[in-house]
Image: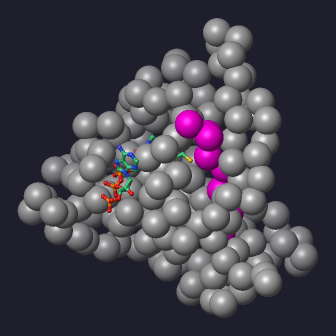
Amino acid sequence: MEPYRNEYILKDGQKLIVRTPEEGDAQGLINLMQTVDNETKFLSREPGEFNITLENEIDFIRNKNNEENGRFLIAELDGNIIGNCYVGIEVNNKRYLHRAGMAIVVRKDCWNKGIGKKMMQECINWCNQKGIEQLELEVVTQNERAITMYKSFGFDIYGTKKHALKYADGTYADEYFMCLFLNGMKPE
Ligand SMILES: CC(C)(COP(=O)(O)OP(=O)(O)OC[C@H]1O[C@@H](n2cnc3c(N)ncnc32)[C@H](O)[C@@H]1OP(=O)(O)O)[C@@H](O)C(=O)NCCC(=O)NCCS
């Protein structure tokens, strides 16, 4: 697919670049994932579980960039990759093509600059361009920051998945299923 790139000036004047990754970004992306897995309990991996090789990460970037039904974007600040997001159709059967899922992460030292919201908007824009009717996600029920952000875009909670995550210490977390209906497709 065509490379994508957008630039923003953040509240503090810094320039944020949101773009599709290149193969040379592989190590930066590995570093990002290893950092964020240590910073929050709200993601899907235990610290140290992200063990991908550079070669496999390069393949991952290539595959993502070739996807027609999804878009993987990185957020770059001062030459460093400090966030990423993915939006895409998760099941390619005809009966599921109206639905997309998404995921987003920003490195903790870059929170509260408005980066999460810019990336969310990129995901929603992609859905609108593709004529997607509903954008879906799962979020840990204690993740107030993310839930507040999703609600500010119009997402609502439609259910709870009990014990969705089990942590290494044996405790559990529940997840909300949240959905944003687009293009006037919200059911009565
Ligand atoms: C959720 C996350 C992506 C937000 O990124 P961010 O760059 O800090 O987001 P922004 O600066 O754009 O702020 C987004 C909104 O978060 C909400 N928010 C910020 N701080 C908050 C707080 N302390 N309590 C509740 N909501 C808060 C606000 O709605 C804010 O928007 P506003 O500033 O216009 O009011 C980021 O915190 C993150 O990566 N967390 C860890 C990974 C994660 O949880 N990902 C989502 C998994 S479903």
Question: Residue 69 at x, y = what percent?
Answer: 67, 72
**Quarter where residue 10 is shown:** bottom left
Q: Nearer the viewer, residue 93 or 128?
A: 128
Q: Is residue 168 visible?
A: yes
The residue at the point 70 percent across, 23 percent down is 172
Q: Main secondary structure of the magenta part?
A: strand
The residue at the point 60 percent across, 28 percent down is 45
Question: Residue 25 at x, y = what percent?
Answer: 37, 47
Assess whether residue 140 is covered by the magenta stretch.
Answer: yes
- Left or right, residue 15 beside residue 175: left
Q: Nearer the viewer, residue 166 or 66?
A: 166
Question: Residue 60 at x, y = what percent?
Answer: 58, 48
Assess whether residue 172 is covered by the magenta stretch.
Answer: no
Residue furthest top as drawn:
169
- Left or right, residue 105 beside residue 86: left
First to last magenta residue range = 135-142
Q: Is residue 51 visible?
A: no
Residue furthest front as drawn:
188
**Where 100 falls versus 24 (above or below)?**
below
The residue at the point 79 percent across, 35 percent down is 162
Instruction: Tell me which colouring the rendered structure shows.
Output: one colour
**Where 165 falls versus 71 (above or below)?**
above
Q: Nearer the viewer, residue 163 or 96?
A: 163
Q: Quadrant of the N terminus?
A: bottom right
